[in-house]
Image: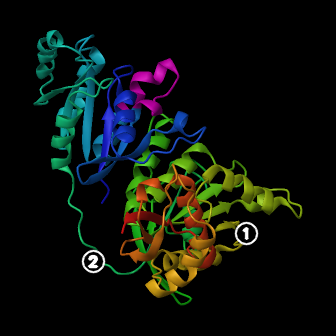
Amino acid sequence: MSNIVAIVGRPNVGKSTLYNRLTETRKAIVDDFSGVTRDRHYGVAEWTDRTFTVIDTGGYVARSEDVFEAAIREQVVIAIEEATVIIFMVDVTTGITDLDDEIAALLRKSSKPVFVVVNKVDNTMLQSDATIFYSLGLGEIFNISSMTGSGTGELLDEVIKHFDDELPEENSLPRYAIVGRPNVGKSSIINALLGQQRNIVTPIAGTTRDSIHIRYNQYGHDFMLIDTAGLRKKTKVKENIEFYSVMRTIKALEEADVVILMVDAVEGLEAQDINIFHLAEKNKKGIVIVVNKWDLIEKNSKTVKVFEEQIKQKIAPFTDVPIIFTSVTEKQRVLKVIDVANKVYENRARKISTSKLNDVMLPIIENFPPPSIKGKYVKIKYATQINGVSPMFAFFCNLPQYVKEPYYRFIENKLRENFDFSGAPVQVWFRQK
């Protein structure tokens, strides 16, 4: 299961600064695509040998003043339900406020591990001021400065002790998760596939709740569907529906082999879809993009091509991903989604023999070697595939440190041109021979 660390607390205590530090300065790979950062509230972080998802709840708070505090309280309740570990952030410069007290009261009732993190402790004078937060009754406090990063290492050392162990897989069937923003038709496609109404489908966003595993065994297909659907989550504040669905999506995504990302044809690919896409990519999942409600779009001979190009621009640089246009209500191309997911599952597991890999790649490398740097030439001797959940290749050479990012992309593209890895993230490494 996925380990999710949720950062909760009232506004302006430094939640986003800590979030940025955890997801960007530890070896976490976080992409800076324009239009994504502004909206991104969740990312991948790494500490020692553990990878986990960090969620900054601050971004989800309703903007309207009347529901402001209600929204924060509700986020804490959702975080208690869904997160593995909760970081409760407070500010040493303001002390304990009424809202801090309310949040602490909710957290005291939960059985989840809670870390009280006192931010802005930038000098020893403030350390004594921080002791007041022991009165919240949540145990040990951690003094940090999220601006400078002091104290975050000690905090993370303790946080990862509370993570769930990664359990070995007991079911060998392929696992496909259907994910996407609320109300894009996730439940409808599952009902169409199963030929029965097993989910509550209403036009109200946020109808679904628990992720459910369903075995699909018909038309020659046999796999597990991970459905982030189920019962209704009663959320009073509509902005928190997105927060709730993101929590659910991350859990489903981590359990899956292939992620079927559903997009609304009318609204197009939005920031949250791009976040989910990159999170799936970072987690080395196979990916299929399904553009649903295609029947609502006025079309001409170029519509599909233009739409595909727009999607590929937004998800770049990993654009070798199948895109299917469906209308679940009209039962158009629903079974094609499964055919393509099966193909992506095979591509992700594809193994290329060392001899075939070298026969294909070495002549290409000879014709287009890495550019020389300071008169030094990189000589690539041979390549081999490394065992991994998704395709990984090691190229052995004399000077791996001189191989720059554009050449990595070039090699990845050539691998994709010659072997079918559509929908599967490919990793390329250059190693010392």
Q: Residue at x 33, y 23 (%)?
A: 147
Of 148 and 359, the residue lying toward us: 359
Secondary structure beneath dot 1 equals loop
Instruction: Report crowding for label 1: few under 14, some 14 to 19, many 20 or more residues within 10 A (C-alpha).
Output: few
Instruction: Indicate which disc residue 66 carries.
Output: none
Whether residue 308 is visible: yes
Q: Position of residue 252 (x, y in %)?
A: 41, 60
Q: Residue 73 magenta-drawn? A: yes
Q: Position of residue 67 (x, y in %)?
A: 46, 24
Q: Residue at x 52, y 37 (%)?
A: 37
Image-based side of 352 in relation to 330, left or right: left
Residue range corresponding to the magenta coloring: 58-74
Distance between mark 2 and mark 1 Cα atoms: 37 Å
Whether residue 234 is visible: no
Q: Earlier in the sequence, mark 2 or mark 1?
A: 2
Q: Which residue is mark 2?
A: 170
Q: Which residue is mark 1?
A: 330
Question: Image quarter for residue 243?
Answer: top left
Camera-near label (2 vs 1) is 2
- Position above or below: 363 against 73: below
Q: Residue 257 magenta-drawn? A: no
Q: Position of residue 74 (x, y in %)?
A: 37, 34
Of 295 and 89, the residue lying toward us: 89
Q: How is the image coloured?
A: rainbow
Question: Image quarter for residue 34?
Answer: top right
Q: Position of residue 352 (x, y in %)?
A: 47, 83
